[in-house]
Amino acid sequence: MDKKIVVCGCTDFGYEIVDFLLTNGVNISHLVSLSPEQAIQYKVSGYKSFELLSTKYGIPIYYPKLYSMKETDFDFFEEEKFDLLLVCGWQRLIPNKILETIKICGIGSHGSSELLPKGRGRSPVNWSIIEGKKQFILQLFMLTPEIDDGDIVYHETFDINEWDTCKTIYYKTSVVMKRALLKLIPNILSNNFSRTPQSGEPSFYPKRTPDDGLIDWNKPLEEIHNFVKALTKPYPGAFSFIDKQKIMIWEAQPFDRKITFSDAKLGEIVEKFSTGDFVVKCNDGTLLITDYEGVVNKGEFLSKL
């Protein structure tokens, strides 16, 4: 009898992983996802419906009563008795009552600039770029009811380079995770895999909200640049204000440190080009804004409102 695999996911990232696994012959018996209405209700970043996967591959899809699945969806898992649970783009912990129904284990993923237990918690991609880290480690681990604290079954390190944004880090994570799961799943289903307990003192990244995207123009140029890269799409974005108008900033790059604007103040738009791109005065240089939303003019000031 084939082993039964269930996948919980509701994001574009998760969709791509699951589509890859199915295309490459992994037999997934059920999908657990959120409906578009639930995604709006829970404000899911990067949401993508798994309905197309369900239709394309003829796989049943289950929509839980609550995103947390606490006390509401146990019966489904108890009835199905899955062998393996995979979490791919699911932004909630899996309740212990559900994990106890899984015959072998549940597998989740976490990426940060350090090996777990360092860097547990929310928004590790964003924080790693904001903090100017130079590497990112994808880690697959056995799910427990707690935050990112299960035994590690796989890890792989890749670079965070000067051109990376949160989007490109997700691309890199996707490549690594696809290959890792394709290799690991048969071993897990045959109970032939190694596991390494986490060791050391844990640290936790705090949750980020859309309001955290406000730019502080008093910070160094590199920090502001990293901030924009960390919060660009699919996240809510970095922003500033001109008077009461909110200016969303999606893409930027350091402009120059030698071309100075000595009379300008921090946050001042010192140049605007015919393309619409504009240059902002920073503490130790200037920042070129190349993708944004809002109306800006030379001589205006970007501020905190």
Image (spheres, rainbow, N blue to C red):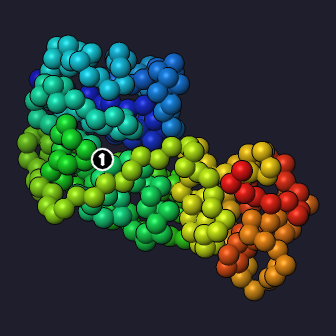
**What residue is at 8 percent from the left and 42 percent from the top?**
191
- Residue 30 vs 239, above or below: the answer is above
- Does dot 1 land on a helix, a strand or a loop? strand
**What residue is at 62 percent from the left and 53 percent from the top?**
214
Regarding residue 16, the answer to whether it shows in the image is no
Please state if 238 lies on the left or on the right of 181 as rendered. right
Regarding residue 261, the answer to whether it shows in the image is yes
- Residue 135 vs 58, above or below: the answer is below
The N terminus: image quadrant? top left
State the residue in front, 233 or 155.
233
Residue 104, position in %: x, y?
A: 11, 35
Residue 7, position in %: x, y?
A: 30, 31
The residue positioned farthest toward the bottom in the image shown:
258
Find disc 1 in the rendering and name its residue: 109
Residue 194, position in %: x, y?
A: 10, 53
**What residue is at 81 percent from the left and 82 percent from the top?**
262
Please state if 301 lies on the left or on the right of 57 as rendered. right
**What residue is at 21 percent from the left and 41 percent from the top?**
146
Residue 283, position in %: x, y?
A: 68, 75
Q: Amino acid at mark 1?
A: Ser
Q: Number of callouts in the render? A: 1
- Residue 300 vs 245, above or below: the answer is below
* Quadrant position of residue 136: bottom left
State the residue in front, 55 or 288.
288
Please state if 2 lies on the left or on the right of 128 as rendered. left
The residue positioned farthest toward the front in the image shown:
305
Q: Residues within 10 Å of mark 1 (few under 14, many from 20)?
A: many
The residue positioned farthest toward the right in the image shown:
274
* Quadrant position of residue 260: bottom right
